[in-house]
Image (cartoon, helix red, strand yellow):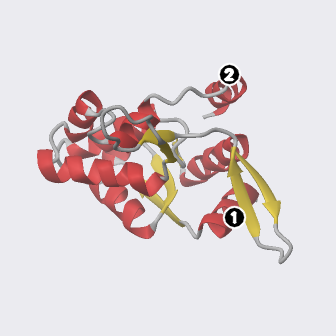
Amino acid sequence: MFDNIEKYIEATSGYLGVQSERYGSGYRAIIGLHSDVTFLTDVLTDPGQGAVQVQYFLGGNPVFPASFGKTVTEALEQLDLKLGILYEFQQDKTGQWECHKKFSIKAQCDSEPGESPEFYDVNWFDVVADLREAYQKEGDAYFYETAEDTCGIGHYRNLHALLNLDLPEGIKSQLKNCC
């Protein structure tokens, strides 16, 4: 039923978490490293402002492997659809699933003055690490908004790369129509 979720989890060794949001507004389905999913779902249930901050992050970054639904099934259906839009799945020679992004998130490496800038591929755990660091520094109140406002190539650079991602138009329109 959720073929893309199964393939993505197998390809990335990811962990799937589904968490109800405060006040019964719905459910978030998230795939990532176990520690990352635990962090995000723990903060989602936080009685303070942290839950709202994670909702802002998840709702404002359509390529992050998470979705929302009024029911658990709807959240999983939306996530499955989203993964099908964002990734191409194929099996390797051993039958193991691989996934390849249809987009690229690059962050700038540190460089010395006068050197040409170099870039690296951003992984989701890098982005969540920036969020976790902001949460630890700022506490739950407005940690995401603060990180969003202060990120750059030298500070929260992985989040900065995600926020400045220029998606291909086809993917943008597909995500707007579904997720």
Q: Residue at x 31, y 40 (%)?
A: 112
37 to the left or right of 84: left
Camera-nearest label, 2 or 1: 2
Badge 2 amino acid: Glu
Residue 80's place in the image compared with 114, above or below, is below
Secondary-structure class at tag 1: helix
Q: Can residue 2 be seen here?
A: no
Q: Position of residue 114 (x, y in %)?
A: 35, 31
Q: Quadrant of residue 11?
A: bottom right
- Checking the image for residue 6, the label placed there is 1
Q: Residue at x 31, y 32 (%)?
A: 152
Q: Residue furthest bottom?
A: 94
Residue situated in front as seen by the camera: 95 or 70: 95
* Position of the N terminus by quadrant: bottom right
Q: Residues within 10 Å of mark 1 (few under 14, many from 20)?
A: some
Q: Position of residue 101 (x, y in %)?
A: 66, 46
Q: Residues within 10 Å of mark 2 (few under 14, many from 20)?
A: few
Q: Residue at x 37, y 67 (%)?
A: 35
Residue of label 2:
169
Residue 152's place in the image compared with 80, above or below, is above
Badge 1 amino acid: Glu
Secondary-structure class at tag 2: helix
153 to the left or right of 105: left
Assess whether mark 1 and mark 2 are in contact (beta carbons under 8 angstroms).
Answer: no
Q: Can residue 130 be seen here?
A: yes
